[in-house]
Image (cartoon, rainbow, N blue to C red):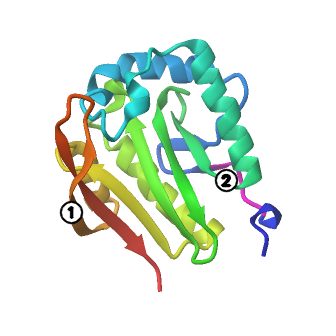
Amino acid sequence: MDPLLIDIPDAFETERLIVRCPRPGDGRLVYEALVESLDALRRFPASLPWALEAPSVERSELFCREGFADFVARRDFPFLIFVRHTSTLAGCCGLRSPDWSIPAFDIGWWGRASCLGQGLVTEAVSGLLDFAKSRLGARRIAAFVDERNVRSLRVCERAGMQLEGVLRYERIDPDGTLRDTCVYARVSE
């Protein structure tokens, strides 16, 4: 079936979160969460090169509008993570690089600095893994995580992903430091 014909909801809920596709007008919320979190995100420039760019409301709005268009076109599936009852943007997550022949996706995320340590990112990622399986028919979802990004490694483990291996010297920081990447995945028979 052509992916454009798949009816996919643009949001789902977990116990504490509303996770939904970005929409036009969400840029300021993303910008505020990003500015608060830049120091932590910039610790992993080989994995998150976009975090090295100077943030702006306009760039964040562009991310939201392009994300919305990609979602509708079934090219990528970005989501914003909102804390239920407060509407606080706790971060972003998403499914990228769809291979519809399997179906398989890559998964990624980042959490807002003030929302870390509460299990919100793990809850969102677990929900997204379930969403991918139930709504997109995903049989493989993989995360590529910098070996030094301990928080994200723990998210993978708590969300039920298995370590498949370590890609040695797979990425390079702007300063020339080679980085290892851990590959985690969840597969469905």
| Residue topped by disc 2 | 75
Q: Position of residue 12 (x, y in %)?
A: 61, 51
Image quadrant where residue 79 sits: top right
- Magenta stretch encompasses residue 31: no
Sooner in the amino-acid sequence: mark 1 or mark 2: 2
Q: Position of residue 29 (x, y in %)?
A: 56, 20
Dot 2 falls on a residue whose secondary structure is: loop
Residue for point 78% across, 76% down: 1
User: Among all residues in the image, which is located at the extreme right?
Assistant: 5
Residue for point 65% across, 42% down: 21
Q: Please state which amino acid type lies under the numbered disc 1.
A: Val
Q: Residues within 10 Å of mark 1 (few under 14, many from 20)?
A: some
Residue for point 33% across, 41% down: 47
Left or right: where does residue 102 sit relative to residue 73? left
Badge 1 vs badge 2, beta-carbon distance below 8 Å: no
For the record, the magenta segment spans: 7-11
Q: Please state which amino acid type lies under the numbered disc 2.
A: Arg
Secondary structure mainly formed by the magenta segment: loop
Dot 1 falls on a residue whose secondary structure is: strand
Q: How many marks?
A: 2
| On screen, residue 6 above or below 82 | below
Residue for point 58% across, 20% down: 59
Taking depth in this image into account, of 108 and 89 the one nearest to the observer is 108
Image quadrant where residue 182 sits: bottom left
Q: Residues within 10 Å of mark 2 (few under 14, many from 20)?
A: some
| Residue topped by disc 1 | 166
Q: Say which mark, if any, is on residue 16.
A: none
**3D distance between C-alphas at marks 1 and 2:** 27 Å
User: Among all residues in the image, which is located at the extreme front?
Assistant: 176
